[in-house]
Image: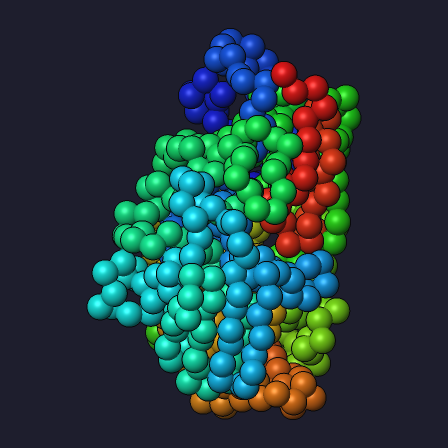
Amino acid sequence: MRDWKLVVSHPCGKGVHEDGPPRFVWPVLLFVAAALLGGCHSPPRDPNTVVFLIESSPANLDPRIGTDAQSQRIDALLFDGLVARDAHFQFTPALAERWEQPDPLTLIFHLRNGVRFHDGRSLTAHDVLWTIQSMLSSKHPGNVITPKAAAYASIDSIEASDERTVVMHLKHPDNFLLTNLSTGAMGIVPQGSGRDFWQHPVGTGPFRFVSQQIDQDVIVERNPLSWSQIPKLQRVRFAVVPDAITESLELEKGSGDVAINSLPMDSLPVLAARPNLRIEETGGTEVQYLSFNLRDPLLADARVRQAISCAIDRDLIIKTMLDGRARAASSLLPPDHWAFNGDGPRFDFDPARAARLLDESGHLRGNNGVRFHITMKTSNVEGTRLLAAVLQQQLAAVGIALDIRSFESATFYSDVMRGAFQMYSLQWIGGNEQPDIFSYAFSTARIPPKGANRGHYSNARLDALLDDANVNPDTAIRRADYAEAQQILARDLPAINLWYRDTVLVHNRRLTHVTPAPSGSYTFLETAELANPD
């Protein structure tokens, strides 16, 4: 078995390269890096600032635009939707204190009184109109280009009957409009917000924006004008640390306070032994997936995609790379969801079957044992590169040569959004808890920039099922629609669902009242406290 290659950044900026299997190198690497760290002198830190370690910068903090994980998770702290969802995914009031639907084509929202934006302006119905119209109309003065627009395409018109009442008239019934108007899915921005809003975002959420340095940090502070609850934390600095070893060291030496779902599982025993650290875990809903570009002639053949699935030993990866802290996924939806169906065709680990599928598709082994080359793009985040290295080894066993190309996170995400890839792997966060994820990710109508069908998958039967499920009021019929849709996706495999990763949060013990959410969101910061703040 070939060795893994780990690239470890010297904490003072020098490059250190180590070869060896990852399961046993973490204690050694952390010890070596700690010794190197002794020559570094970090500037004094504000004891009232929580340092939250993240792997990459948010791509865009305008909640109308940002769809990457960091943007959505930080935006959920800065902005509010019209409604919210509780732990059981039931809708609760947010900026709208109440709402009614007098008929299937009309929604009326009554805004909460006394809500102010971070800059002191009062929230009115005109801010809601501006937010939605700027996403839907290219002629709107604040128009932004966003893949989120299709989520609101059912809105025919929107009006403010007074300063606190918003009336939406729909083109057709939309079972998911409330979901798409909820905190985390969208955020209300002030009237007049333009395309440069991402540089100085202003919301109504419990935290307010202070500053951002691309690839360095984002700083937010508590919002004393918060309509819901004022956080106990004074300030949070989201520090960008793409290197996993450095991230672990920051936690160990106390210069980092918290990290979530970004540390290699093999580092956890080392961190758990540190008296200043605590680990919180819960079952997760975040799905790791592998996506294909179906415009590529090689990957357009479903048998090739099925063979790749049969070549991947998920159980081995979960056991070794993830230390058992995940469960194999057969759908984007969590298994306990009312619309979940895992009864579709299965292409589990079976190298012999993979070889047969590749032979049948005409891709025979050459003299060197290689059938073809395929390129997988990744970010420079450590966990993503390690996963690519594992897949490279497993695919090689069936004659597929996987070429790995790693890029800076913003470049990688930009390439994914514009379809410049053969294969890539990312995680679905939060949004996969609702069945409209299938439309967003796989409907023909949701090819970018109108959604996240980045692989350009198209299936007329799937489109019809999802369209019906979107408007049909009968839950039993909708459940049947989604069941067949998941069977189609399990057969065609425009993307491979790999696993639901457990949510693992490591934090300094000075940070208390920490309760991680299954989705891996950052909302625990709203109730967390510092044990001895100054």
Tell me: residue 379, above or below residue 94: above
On the question of residue 66 being in view, the answer is no
Residue 171 falls left or right of residue 179: left
Quarter of the rendering containing residue 330? bottom right
Q: Is residue 65 above or below residue 365?
A: above
The colour scheme applied to this rendered structure is rainbow
When the figure is inspected, residue 439 is found, relative to residue 287, above or below; the finding is below
Relative horizontal placement of residue 236, taking residue 126 as reference (left or right)? right
Of 513 and 509, the residue lying toward us: 513
Tell me if residue 234 can be seen: yes
**Tag count:** 0
Judged left or right of residue 521, residue 208 is left
Image coordinates for residue 410, horizontal then vertical, percent: 37, 46
Where, by quadrant of the figure, is residue 104 drawn?
Answer: bottom right
Q: Position of residue 67 (x, y in %)?
A: 44, 56
Pick the front one: 113 or 442: 113
- Picture coordinates of residue 33, whole percent (x, y): 57, 20
Residue nearest the viewer, comparing 45 with 319? 45
Residue found at the very far front of the displayed protein? 162
In the image, taking residue 421 as reference, residue 178 lies left or right, namely right
Q: Residue at x 57, y 28 (%)?
A: 234
Seen at 43% across and 49% down, the residue is 122
Q: Is residue 516 above or below residue 435?
A: above
Which residue is depicted at the point 58% across and 75% down?
Answer: 100
Q: Position of residue 200 (x, y in %)?
A: 35, 41
Image quadrant occupied by the C terminus: top right
388 or 355, which is in the foreground? Answer: 388
Q: Residue at x 40, y 53 (%)?
A: 189
